[in-house]
Image: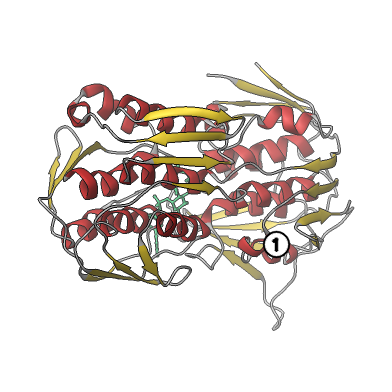
């Protein structure tokens, strides 16, 4: 288990480029299984989750070649379906969340899929009903081996149908879309998730010959086609990294330019930080965050205390609430952070409380933060990162704290943030990896 040692109190200065979006690329990598032709993908981040999924594709027989610093070519002309039965495959699936999206493409192209319970952050219940109900509606049979925690799906062929998802699940929608592009006839998916990750997946699939309309809405219509062909695809900048850098700049009182953010795909993210009083200036496709000694949380128009809550797109992604929460600890004013989706994502606030933050954890979903207005600095801490986003929030806290902090289990941070210590040190941070 590696750790970061962070000397707090150093301001950042300069420009930073966000990496490619982790949650998009996990979908895109799975989609390469839908054709026997070559698919090239650029702007792939060099992070643990992505590298593990690329290795899993290789192990399945997909020909993978690295064609540039952040680009790869994939050719799934032969896939070893027997490998899906192996203990090694099942073990690897259980180490990352993205593996669940192998199901849709595998069943659509090969009529068979097998995966173990996928990994990912331990942030509360993460059910998969939406995925499997949807794929069954397309005509597949489904079995769950409770003892071995293995899901298996088979289908002679898939038939398009109308479905209303029980929730707008991100990876669930991706799985069902990838299954239905090769189904016979028309599928409609209502209450579909429509995060930019999914919009990008649908655009890529259309580039491969799929017929998907309704992209960016919660009603997708898919006309099944016989087969798909190769394409090239570029991954968008990671909007969660962009949000993390906005929060980091504000919390450390730094001036920072976040380059090439793809502003049109950030949705409500910049506005959510503005509601905390942070100045976020759009300059072309960059975001400029000026140095700010103080920032004041807005109230609602009627004077009541601000709530920041997550919601399916175009609402605020739950993946940024931990960052919003930590940034609020140094603001002037109070805010209720309401994490509606996940049940165990706010427990890391205990660590912030140890560092001197004023937070009341009301229940597993809600925390009230009473900002210090920088009247004193957080104290350095010794902590363990429970999940990827709590990890970056603790790193931000440590960077602004008085003294030297340690964060253990930084593999959690590495899962989603490329080379984060070196990139931040280049801006003036003092982070050592041990
Ligand atoms: C690899 C990947 O892409 N992971 C993302 C994906 O996970 P993932 O696809 O696993 O998350 P889901 O969208 O399925 O759902 C996340 C949680 O929110 C709940 N839920 C979901 C939809 C809804 O309308 N109401 C509701 O309460 C679900 O019950 C679940 O507990 O989407 C999550 C929600 O944006 C993000 O946090 C994850 O980073
Ligand atoms: C929850 C996250 O990731 P995963 O779904 O891969 O666990 C995340 O990216 O914040």
Q: Where's residue 87, x and y in %?
A: 22, 23
Q: Where's residue 354, x and y in %?
A: 65, 37
Disc tally is 1
Left or right: 97, with 15 as reference point: left
Q: Quadrant of the C terminus?
A: top right
Q: Where's residue 128, x and y in %?
A: 28, 51
Disc 1 under 8 Å from ligand 1? The reply is no
Question: Toward the viewer: 269 or 102?
Answer: 102
The quarter holding residue 205 reads bottom left
Left or right: 242, with 164 as reference point: right
How did the renderer colour the structure? Answer: secondary structure
The quarter holding residue 377 reads top right
Q: Residue furthest bottom?
A: 302
The quarter holding residue 77 reads top left
Left or right: 118, with 4 as reference point: left
Question: Toward the viewer: 270 or 375?
Answer: 270
Is the residue 149 above or below the residue 6 in the image?
Answer: below
Is the residue 147 above or below the residue 189 in the image?
Answer: above
Q: Where's residue 136, x and y in %?
A: 16, 57
Question: Toward the viewer: 266 or 291?
Answer: 266
According to the image, label 1 marks what residue?
270
Residue at 89% x, 51% y: name it: 291
Q: Tell me the element at label 1.
A: helix
């Amino acid at each position: 288990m590696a750790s970061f040692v962070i000397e707090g109190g150093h301001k950042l200065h300069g420009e930073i480029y966000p990496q490619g979006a982790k949650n998009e690329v996990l979908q895109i990598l799975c989609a390469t299984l839908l054709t026997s032709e070559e698919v090239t993908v650029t702007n792939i981040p060099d992070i643990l989750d992505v590298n593990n999924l690329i290795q899993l594709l290789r192990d399945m027989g997909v020909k993978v070649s690295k064609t540039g610093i952040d680009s790869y070519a994939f050719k799934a002309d032969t896939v070893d379906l027997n490998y899906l039965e192996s203990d090694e495959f099942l073990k690897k699936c259980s180490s990352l969340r993205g593996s669940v999206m192998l199901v849709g493409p595998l069943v659509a192209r090969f009529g068979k899929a097998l995966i173990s319970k996928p990994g990912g952050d331990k942030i509360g219940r993460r059910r998969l009903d939406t995925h499997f109900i949807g794929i069954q509606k397309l005509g597949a049979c489904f079995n769950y081996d409770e003892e071995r925690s293995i899901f298996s799906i088979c289908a002679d062929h898939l038939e398009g149908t109308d479905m209303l998802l029980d929730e707008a699940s991100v990876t669930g929608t991706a799985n069902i879309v990838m299954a239905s592009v090769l189904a016979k006839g028309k599928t409609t998916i209502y209450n579909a998730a429509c995060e930019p990750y999914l919009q990008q997946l649908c655009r890529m699939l259309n580039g491969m010959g799929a017929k998907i309309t309704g992209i960016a809405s919660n009603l997708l219509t898919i006309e099944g086609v016989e087969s798909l062909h190769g394409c090239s695809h570029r991954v968008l900048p990671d909007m969660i990294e962009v949000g993390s850098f906005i929060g980091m700049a504000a919390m450390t009182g730094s001036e920072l330019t976040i380059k090439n953010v793809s502003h049109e795909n950030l949705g409500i993210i910049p506005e959510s930080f503005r509601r905390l009083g942070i100045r976020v200036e759009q300059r072309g496709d960059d975001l400029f965050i000026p140095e700010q000694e103080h920032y004041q949380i807005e109230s609602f128009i009627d004077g009541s205390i601000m709530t920041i809550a997550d919601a399916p797109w175009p609402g605020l992604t739950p993946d940024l609430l931990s960052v919003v929460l930590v940034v609020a600890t140094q603001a002037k004013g109070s805010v209720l952070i309401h994490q509606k989706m996940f049940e165990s994502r706010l427990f890391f606030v205990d660590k912030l409380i140890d560092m001197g933050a004023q937070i009341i954890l009301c229940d597993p979903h809600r925390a009230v933060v009473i900002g210090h207005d920088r009247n004193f600095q957080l104290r350095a801490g010794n902590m363990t990162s429970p999940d990827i986003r709590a990890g970056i929030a603790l790193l931000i806290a440590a960077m602004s704290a008085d003294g030297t902090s340690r964060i253990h289990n930084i593999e959690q941070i590495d899962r989603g943030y490329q080379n984060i210590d070196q990139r931040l040190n280049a801006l003036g941070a003092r982070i050592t990896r041990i």
